[in-house]
Image: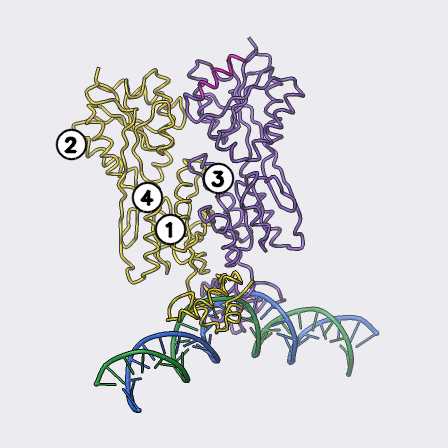
Chain colours: A yellow, B purple, C blue, D green
Amino acid sequence: MPTSKDVARLAGVSQSTVSYVMSGRRPISEKTRKRVEDAMAQLAFQPNAGARALASRRTQVIGLAIPFVPDLHMGSIMEFISVIAATARQSDYDILLVTDDEGPQGLERVVGQQLVDGLIIMQVEGDDARVPVIRNLPVPSVLIGIPEKHDGLECIDADFELAGQMCIEELAKLGHETITLVDWQDEVIRRHVNYVKRFHRGVDKAAAATGTKIIHAPGRITVAGMEKAVAKALEQSRGIPAFIAPEAANQDLVVEALNNLGLVLGKDVSVVVNSSDSDAERQRIPLTTIGFEPDEVSRRVVHMIVRDLTDPMSRPHEALELIRPVFRHRKSTVRPHSKR
Amino acid sequence: MPTSKDVARLAGVSQSTVSYVMSGRRPISEKTRKRVEDAMAQLAFQPNAGARALASRRTQVIGLAIPFVPDLHMGSIMEFISVIAATARQSDYDILLVTDDEGPQGLERVVGQQLVDGLIIMQVEGDDARVPVIRNLPVPSVLIGIPEKHDGLECIDADFELAGQMCIEELAKLGHETITLVDWQDEVIRRHVNYVKRFHRGVDKAAAATGTKIIHAPGRITVAGMEKAVAKALEQSRGIPAFIAPEAANQDLVVEALNNLGLVLGKDVSVVVNSSDSDAERQRIPLTTIGFEPDEVSRRVVHMIVRDLTDPMSRPHEALELIRPVFRHRKSTVRPHSKR
DNA sequence: GCGCATCGTCGATACGCATCGACAAACCGA
DNA sequence: TCGGTTTGTCGATGCGTATCGACGATGCGC
């Protein structure tokens, strides 16, 4: 592999000049720059990352702590990861994976070994074991998700409270008086995931404001379980029933349960689910959705950490960024004034 | 951050001795080792990855080329990634992501910058642009998937031919005379993904051997499309109809289409899908599955590249490893002799 | 035409670790 | 007891880049 010394020799300059051509930290004459760049191209030179990290104390790598998920909604996690990786590249950073297998010490390891310049922590829970760890780390971190105590941390997430609010308001606008919230699955709630609470808060707030009655149905993992829950909710509904399923994993279950009970979406019942647009549009009856905009969250989280790394003076500065969710009307919700 | 020199000073030895304690490449007396290890613990010493890479010319990082998937079956990709990352850690390697955004040059970049010691390439297609690139790279690579020309390459994949065979044989054993193969979706087939061909080959082989009639139904992306395809297949079936859906994305569609047509799985019709066990068991009627064992593939691919890196003498050695799929009988297939 | 700031380049050094050669000490068999 | 081997440790060097101080060359104002 060619080194900067080889480039220098070929271009007839010193090695330090080559370095300055790359970094631009000192003025270089047009003539010299050209010669050096030609030499680099001719040798297909690429700077050695290890040497660069050693000398500059920056690796241009960001650690990404991915959640350990047995089998829950892995699709959306993948979406985060690939957008994060692609966005990071645009700022000349690479992404190193940190799995939960090592526990929070994994984070200490990659930072201690100086493998990464900063961290992105995915799927942060209300009381997350990783939070106390990153507080003591000498590199910046940005969290996806909002822990209970987030003073001095940089967090970003979808605005779940607003999402809950939007769902109720939109459905109330369509004329629904009773709305069933098909909740997250037990294991998620048990993990103290903060966003569940926030969504509920938004729902309650909007329900009070609009005078809507809310029925809580537990999230169920099987179609049969979901049918039972839905049937029970239907009994208690007044007017045309409406369902909200903010957990992506419940999307299919709710739709199937309602189908099986003989109800036609958008006519006998309104349904709002959380799912990707492509999934929603591919259904026989395209689904009205509340989207948590994972792509936007991913992009912002990268911009945030890159800013921290580029301009360390701006740190430490607490930040809490909430991404506005998007409500998309499709065919699974009834039209206004179309009550029977 | 403490360095090995700090450790050496504290332990009263030379820096090189500290290095030999870590690597074990020279004998160290019990007494000295203890002193050094205590010093390391006391300082919470972690070796600097950049310096280590520079001196040893190994980074202990493996590059993972993840596929660019607009929205197709991202769940299973995530499964690969997390198992690969976790398995790599067991051999003291980290995983660096390489997205498709940079194209094949991304691979040249991470290798050229000496960010990684080797590469794992996911989702390799029949005629993959990345293959010619990695052939010229000075580091070992292992592919998941099998390109047309794979001489001199190390490849690993599920044994799709055997999978096709197993599906037909099992269904024939249950008494089915006509079997409908719900195919992969057009875009997948168009991409020349080799495994589709291999699966078909297995199906054809077993069909000939068992005297089974095969109906090909195109993979469809919507429920409505799937219903039409299924209905057409039903007309042409003799005896109790059977369906195979080897693409994970089709799982829900096939089941829903059959439900909508009023057929009861495991009684009026047999269905075999590809899906995770947890997904299959969570259905109202647990689904009989053909599993491509992504976890096993992931583990093997890591072991393969780690072996290449640990013992470079064993390279280059062509290898083609096929992982045996698993057929799991559940309730969506009829019992033998239960014909009406 | 002179002093002075700016421009452009070079040489030297540091970054933290791995590794090689050297060497003293301990051990062995005869 | 002695040559020879093994054991254990050290000092020196190199890995490839970034960066600092130095310095000659050039441009500027007057």
Identify which residue is drawn at 48% across, 39% down.
B77
Is B147 situated left or right of A99 in this image?
Answer: right
Classify mark 2: residues with Cα within 10 Å, few (<14), some (14-19) or many (20+): few
Task: Using the numbered discs, state the Cα–Cα distance from disc 1 to disc 2 in whole angstroms.
Answer: 37 Å
Identify which residue is drawn at 37% across, 61% down.
A138
Instruction: Looking at the picture, tell me which residue is in the foreground, A39 or B191.
Output: A39
Residue B39 visible in the picture: no
- Residue marked by disc 4: A296
Disc 1 and disc 3 in contact, CB within 8 angstroms? no
Residue interval drawn in magenta: B226-236
Q: Which mark is residue A120?
A: 1
Task: Using the numbered discs, state the Cα–Cα distance from disc 4 to disc 2 in whole angstroms.
Answer: 29 Å
Q: Vertically, is B105 above or below A223? A: below
Residue B67 visible in the picture: yes
Classify mark 1: residues with Cα within 10 Å, few (<14), some (14-19) or many (20+): many
Task: Using the numbered discs, state the Cα–Cα distance from disc 2 to disc 3 in whole angstroms.
Answer: 43 Å
Among all residues in the image, which is located at the extreme top?
Answer: B340
Is residue B232 one of those drawn in magenta? yes
Task: Using the numbered discs, state the Cα–Cα distance from disc 4 to disc 3 in whole angstroms.
Answer: 23 Å
